[in-house]
Image (cartoon, rainbow, N blue to C red):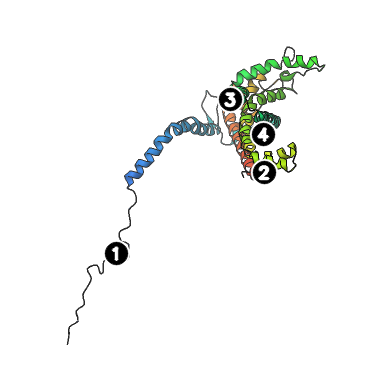
Amino acid sequence: MTARTTGTRPDAGHAGPSGSGPGDGPVPAGPPRRAKVRKAATVLLFLAPSAVPLVLFTLVPMAGSLWVSLHEWNLIGAMRWTGLGNYAGILRDGDTWRALGNTTLYIAGYLPLVYVGGLGLAMALNRVTRGRDLFRAVYFLPVITSWVVVALIWKWLLNPSEGIVNKLLAVIGVEGPGWWTSDAWALPSVIIAAAWKDLGFVMVILLAGLQAVPAEALEAARVDGANAWQRFRHITLPLLSPSTAFVLVISCISGFQVFDQVYVMTSGGPAAAASEVMVERVYDLTFRYGRVGDASALSWVLFLVILLVTVVQVRLQRRWVNYG
């Protein structure tokens, strides 16, 4: 009878830490917690120069404005809780809807004027080979000029009795309107001044878009017999659509926030608040009538209107903006 000896391998019965077979090494551990903390601290350090002012001067005031909108307050006495009463009050106020209507009319007149004018300047400069940078700087100069200065200049130019515009109209036999002294022409006066000031900004954006249009595509269309209008309509405009979309969104947001030019040129008048816009209504409620809670509520209503319009614009862009 022979005894059977069973030997065992040295590594038998020793599995890896995760139950794997013999020979499998341990799973590498992730970076230590200290390294993760150090990385997060480094990121926060680099974000701090922009994040701290954003929190202190934007997010905190926004939160404060939301809190004030739920109270009745006159900037002096104690605040009294009203809940959503301020919102209900301003939505029932006819002056709110009149200011919103004036703001909408301002945007409806301002957007086409500034876009068509900016596109015309951009197309003209796109053909210029010498001095393009000089002309671009000259047209952009009003953009960086103070709104108070621009508004005062246009208030003088559109003076009904002494203004240059009405004197030039008189030369060709046209009687000039009352401009900013007239109920009917106060808002158009502001629109003209605003469009003139912002033409340079729109021009720069659209000029960059025009310079990105492939010359080969335009030349191929010309060889195929397309005239200038057809090339512009079917090639230039579609390829310019991203720049157009950007201009429309930014200009629309700016239009809802119009204030300086209206305050300096017309102060919301001349009568029956003919040119009062939303932001000026906020200003009047705060500093003229001492209704800070109502003003804060109106500010948040305006914010929601801008947000809604912007979201609609961005969604509609999917149908007509060509990023190819």
What residue is disc 2 on?
320
Of tags 1 and 3, the one toward the viewer is 1
Of tags 1 and 4, the one toward the viewer is 1
The location of residue 48, given as percent across then percent down, is 42, 33
Q: Secondary structure at mark 3?
A: helix
Q: Earlier in the sequence, mark 1 or mark 4?
A: 1
| Circle on res. 286 | 3
The location of residue 150, given as percent across then percent down, is 63, 19
Choose top left, top right, bottom left or bottom right for residue 66: top right
Q: Earlier in the sequence, mark 1 or mark 3?
A: 1
Residue projecting furthest to the front: 223
Q: Are marks 1 and 3 in contact (CB under 8 Å)?
A: no
Q: Earlier in the sequence, mark 1 or mark 2?
A: 1
Q: CA–CA distance between discs 4 and 2?
A: 37 Å
Choose top left, top right, bottom left or bottom right for residue 276: top right
What residue is disc 4 on?
92
Examine the rendering and report whether any part of residue 220 can be seen.
yes
| Circle on res. 23 | 1
Q: Secondary structure at mark 4?
A: helix
Q: Are marks 3 and 4 in contact (CB under 8 Å)?
A: no
Residue projecting furthest to the right: 173
| Circle on res. 49 | none
Q: CA–CA distance between discs 3 and 4?
A: 18 Å
Q: CA–CA distance between discs 2 and 3?
A: 42 Å
Q: Earlier in the sequence, mark 4 or mark 2?
A: 4
Amino acid type, callout 1: Gly
The location of residue 52, given as percent across then percent down, is 44, 32
Left or right for 2, reference 246: left
Q: Secondary structure at mark 2?
A: helix
